[in-house]
Image (tube, helix red, strand yellow):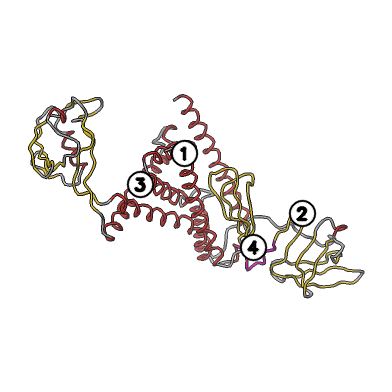
Amino acid sequence: MSNVQIGIQIILMFFLLVTLHEWGHFYFAKRAGILVREFAIGFGPKLFSYKKGETTYTLRLLPIGGYVRMAGEDPEIVQVSAGQTIGIRLKNDRITHLYLDQLDQRSQSIQGEVEAIDLERELFVRMIVDGESVRFPVEPHAYMVARGKETQIAPWDRQFGSKTVAQRAMSIAAGPVMNFLLAFLLFLIVMVMNGMPTNVKLGKVEADSPAYTAGLKEGDIVLEVNHTAIGSDSGKLSELIQASKDQPMMWIIERNKEQMQKTLTPKQMEDKVRVGITLTYDKRSVAVGEAISGAWDQMVFVTQNILVGFKQLLFGQFKMDDLGGPVRIVEVSGQFASAGLAPMISWSALLSLYLGIFNLLPFPALDGSRLVFLAVEAVRGRPIDPNRESIVHFIGFAMLMLLMIAVTYNDILRLIQG
């Protein structure tokens, strides 16, 4: 497979994982009636954007994640205060645009000094026009225009903070949930592609190895070893080999539908006891129930291993080389892409599951932390001060970026040093 094909697969994989995660946030936010200002893939400078409806869809330079920007979470609206001169545009006697600068170029607008303004609840502007105080109603979808940029106002009922705890929690949790669903679907696809193992079969047999000397050949099916049925359990076969160093083993194999008995003696080869074979499987197609059960079992197994990794990270049972950033992920993804479609899909499933679990950790700036704040709000009956919560998330985000820089530097250093 060419490097171009591998690169395309990796890009598509990251795009799928991040886009589906953010789509979960986006979809349930829209269902709750929240104004979603931006759906972004990546961070940093904007490479491409287009607007559809109320939302701007952007692709940004740094492919290390994405975000959904909801009204009420960012100070995107420029504040207008009493005494400020502004211009307004009307349609059917209601304000559709509020102009905050370059008023000399707004010849078609009504201009005046603001006396009072409420763009969240009552939706009105009272201003002095030609010496007279006039009150104008504001359209819920009106725009504020400043520095050449139009920003849709967000009435209180369109803001994130106005929704129930359950609606906000669903909007946040939906991102990781989408990753879990994607992981299950990908594991299911791999189960269907690979089939169900029926018997352990020999792959490559190394020259001059105990297996070669005993007459084993590639394609032989292993039925029994030391009177123990093997079936599809390659782990059991490996255990028997490891426990039989320098001891003769009796193997019953099947070759061309004929059973044969072979005797071989495992030897210490490099770092472990070996007989000089690689293992593969005889397979059959899977039934629907088997595929679903197998995909679920694989999800549980991978989840357990991911949680063990997080536990080691939490208690300091790791080395810096055990951590990997974007560079290492791309490197490993390239190896899986080179191995074939099924390994790449399986790796994508693992990353999707990892992304979902990681985002549910109760660390500031992650979805899990935001869910913790909502749980506290549900218990105490009132929200935590938004400014304090924002500070916590900002600190957490800064810490994550520092960790990302550190592991990326380590990855690059490791590549340079070979």
- Indicate yes or no whether the magenta region holds residue 231: no
Marks 1,3: beta carbons within 8 A:
no
- Nearer-the-camera pick, 16 or 322: 16
Task: Please tell me whether residue 45 is drawn above or below residue 174 in the rendered image.
Answer: above
Residue 276 in the image: state x and y as whole percent.
Answer: 20, 30
Q: CA distance from mark 4 to mark 1?
A: 34 Å
Q: What's the magenta region?
A: 152-159
Q: Position of residue 137 (x, y in %)?
A: 76, 73
Q: What kind of residue is marked 1?
A: Val
Q: Seen in the image, is 126 located left or right of residue 195?
A: right
At label 3, which amino acid type do we have? Ala
Q: Residue 113's x, y, as percent?
A: 86, 64
**Residue nearest the observer in this picture, 383 or 126:** 126
Residue positioned most to the right: 131
- Per the image, the residue denoted by label 4 is 54
Q: Residue 333's spot in the image, x, y percent?
A: 43, 40
Residue, disc 2: 148
Marks 4, 3: nearer the viewer:
3
Q: Gap in Å between the C-alphas at discs 2 and 1?
A: 39 Å
Marks 3 and 2 sit apart, C-alpha to C-alpha, by 50 Å
N-term-proximal mark, 4 vs 3? 4
Q: SS of the residue at dot 1?
A: helix
Alpha carbon of mark 4 to alpha carbon of mark 3: how far?
39 Å
Q: Amino acid at mark 2?
A: Gly
Label 2 SS: loop
The local crowd at label 2, few if under 14, some if 14 to 19, many if 20 or more residues have their Cα within 10 Å, is few
* Quadrant assignment, res 221: top left
Residue annotated with mark 1:
330
Of residue 383 and residue 206, the one placed in the foreground of this image is 206
Mark 1–mark 3 Cα distance, whole angstroms, equals 17 Å
Marker disc for residue 342: 3
